[in-house]
Amino acid sequence: MEDYQKIRTTIKDWDEADRPREKLMSLGRQSLTNAELLAIILGGGNKEKNAVELAKEILLSVDNNLSELSKLSYKDFCNRFKGVGPAKAISIVAALELGYRRKHSSTLQRPIINSSNDAYNAVAHLLLERDREDFFVLLLANNNKLIRVVQVSSGGINETLVDRKIIFKTALEHNAVKIILAHNHPSGDTKPSNADINATRTIVEAGKIMSIQILDHIIIGVDDAYYSFLDNGII
């Protein structure tokens, strides 16, 4: 009878499209099996098994039930599975705990921005009482739901320079179709300068080319004072 020697293959020997990390990057996290996801957390296998094979062994021990897997302590992982030391075990336990917390956390409620006051309330806490001018953008979906508030520049005491390329790059990265501009005047005077007006008009025109609508520009002062370009007919 002919003897066959089992040759251990590593994940590096696989086609690139089949490797868990590359598969996640190209096809998204939903495309991976539980074993492949666990293999990424493990980062490596042992002398006999690659990371995916080790992950399958671990999952099989709990009948492929992630809830049962989450009940194992880091000591359980170390004691029961060859090649799983404290570092790998702690990574698994931490990942499972993070998943548990995500499941039981409430969905973040993102407000609908329908007025200058809505915009002010969404960004004022980030700009009040600053001693320099900083510039933020409120990124909105098509239904005016706030996606995110992002700082795009930081300036000096009297002005901040804004690169419109950064503004639109930020919008595209977050799939925003509408933008509200916002910056502060540390002096407390919310009246826009000529530079503020000219910069805003330039950004509005650039937005038309990019099919991204600039809804408003809010200048925040002190004591709940703000200036809306839309309310004052500048946009």
Image: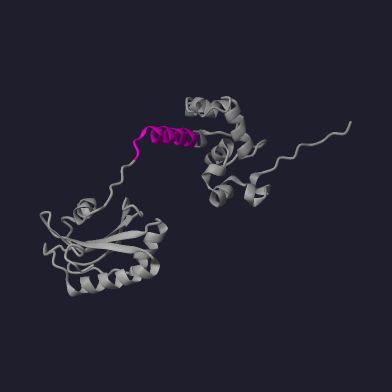
The residue drawn where x is 38% and y is 65% is: 211
Where in the figure is residue 138, as x and y percent of width and height? 29, 56
Is residue 221 shown left or right of residue 119? left
Instruction: Tell me where residue 232 appears, x and y as whole percent.
Output: 16, 65
Is residue 171 shown above or below 68? Answer: below
User: Where is 111 relative to 234, above or below?
Assistant: above
- Dividing the image into 4 quarters, which one contains the C terminus? bottom left
* Relative side of 213 to 229, left or right: right
Residue 20 percent coordinates (x, y): 58, 45
Note whether residue 46 is visible.
no
Q: Nearest the camera: 7 or 151?
A: 151
Q: Is the magenta stretch mostly helix, strand or loop?
A: helix
Q: Quadrant of residue 153?
A: bottom left
Q: In this view, does 219 lie to the left or right of 207?
A: left
Image color mode: one colour
Q: Which of 176 and 193 is in front in this view?
A: 176
Quadrant of the image containing the N terminus: top right
Q: Magenta includes 38? A: no
Does residue 38 appear to the left or right of 94 in the view shown?
A: right
Total count of labels: 0
Residue 93 highlighted magenta (yes or no): yes
- In the image, residue 196 above or below residue 53: below
- The answer to whether one can see residue 57 in this image is yes
Residue range of the region highlighted in magenta in the rendering:
90-107
